[in-house]
Amino acid sequence: MSRGIAILGSTGSIGRNALRVIEALGPEYRIIGLSAHRNVELLAEQVRKHRPKYVAITNREYAGRFRMLVDDPKVRVLPGTDGLTELVRCDEVDTVLTAVVGAAGLPSALAAARAGKRLAIANKEPLVIAGELLTREAKAYGSTLLPIDSEHSAVFQAMQSGAAREVHRILLTGSGGPFRGANLSDLEGVTPEQALAHPIWSMGPKITVDSATMMNKALEVIEARWLFDVPVDRIEVLIHPESIVHSLVEFVDGSVIAQLGEPDMCLPIQYALTYPQRVPGVAKRLRLDQIGRLRFERPDLQTFRTLPLAYEVARAGGTAAAVFNAANETAVEEFLAGRIRFLQIVELVEHCLANHDVRQTTSLEELLEADAWARRQVKDRLLVGR
């Protein structure tokens, strides 16, 4: 089997791990394209090592700097956000791994689906913001959607044990983040440094803060609803501090199938790239005898209000999820910059949802309009508060 792969967001943690995985898989897995936003120094190192034919740099201002670092006419530079879309449409690319943070990766994910590519999705936003649209387009154009998020990869793997119609419920697990067991008063003075101190996973700052608010699990509920075509009321969340059981599927006969593994993103990345085959790889091996015990708890919905909000958003449909995601992204940026308190993140998300008139649309333009509206609402709300 030979695959031509484009990695969107190759300088992030998922992108770096994906390059490790591909290097170990051998020459049948070829890097055709890489992309970055502005970390052109690391991108240049990756290009010199992996020799892709195409490089997309979404921040146009950094394209010139990249050319100073890599003066190779064989490497074609695709500047601007349109560069991602151009990259995924290349004939040499049959597999697109998208790990672009935020809504910026949505147009290229849709373009990959419409081009009939295998689309390995690491970031939540394409399915959260445009789940109905993306899954419909993938089906229409013969694109295969493969999850890389560890929880959804686990569900996808477990679902190979039965037919979709035989699934009774999906159980998404989460570590509980750095504030598991805390109450609202404990979270009043949380600093960015504390929110970024995840006890298990090493991730980028945005998703780490999402883990601290449990927004990551809230987004995963919405993502799972579309990816697996399961009503949201049949998706549940369990806190699992050891992060060994990555998720479970209960079938109608009562059987519960779980996928277990070390907290290592290399395994779900590799499974998405090699599916339906399994081959040796670089992921760390699981030793259950060294773990001792596995715990499961129900989440605290009073303290972590993002979870019940996710179910409301999923039931509302339309533009609600675009607003939910964009308000959170913008609030997290403000928190990391030290301009708002930790608990204000969810307060700002609630404010945007309460003031948004949901439109039942599957148009990309209207979804992006709702995204932009929510970002403005957060900024305006903060200006009023000051």
Image (cartoon, rainbow, N blue to C red):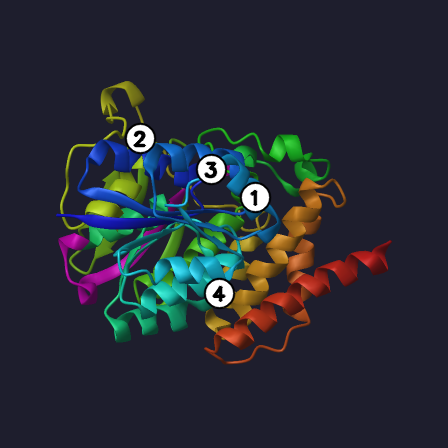
Please state which of the two labelled residues, at mark 3 or mark 2, is closer to the viewer: 3
> Which amino acid, mark 2?
Glu
Mark 4 vs 2: CB contact within 8 A: no
Task: Please report whichever mark, 3 or 4, sits nearer to the chain's N-terminal start.
Answer: 3
Q: Residue at left 19%, top 46%?
A: 274
Residue 262: assigned label: 2
Task: Please report whichever mark, 1 or 4, sits nearer to the chain's N-terminal start.
Answer: 1
Q: Is residue 164 magenta?
A: yes
The reply, left or right, for residue 255 in relation to residue 284 is left
Residue 129: assigned label: 4
| Secondary structure of the residue carrying numbered label 2 | loop
Q: Mark 3, residues whose alpha carbon is within 10 Å: few (<14), some, or many (≥20)?
A: some
> Which amino acid, mark 3?
Val
| Secondary structure of the residue carrying numbered label 1 | loop
Mark 3 vs 2: CB contact within 8 A: no
> For mark 3, what is the residue?
70
> For mark 1, what is the residue?
38
Q: Return the x and y of residue 194 as percentages of the image width and height.
A: 63, 31
> Label 2 to label 1, Cα distance in Å?
31 Å
The reply, left or right, for residue 361 in relation to residue 59 is left
> Label 3 to label 1, Cα distance in Å?
15 Å
Please state which of the two labelled residues, at mark 3 or mark 4, is closer to the viewer: 3
| Image quadrant in which you'd find residue 109 | bottom left
Question: 379 or 358, which lies in front?
Answer: 379
Please state which of the two labelled residues, at mark 3 or mark 1, is closer to the viewer: 3
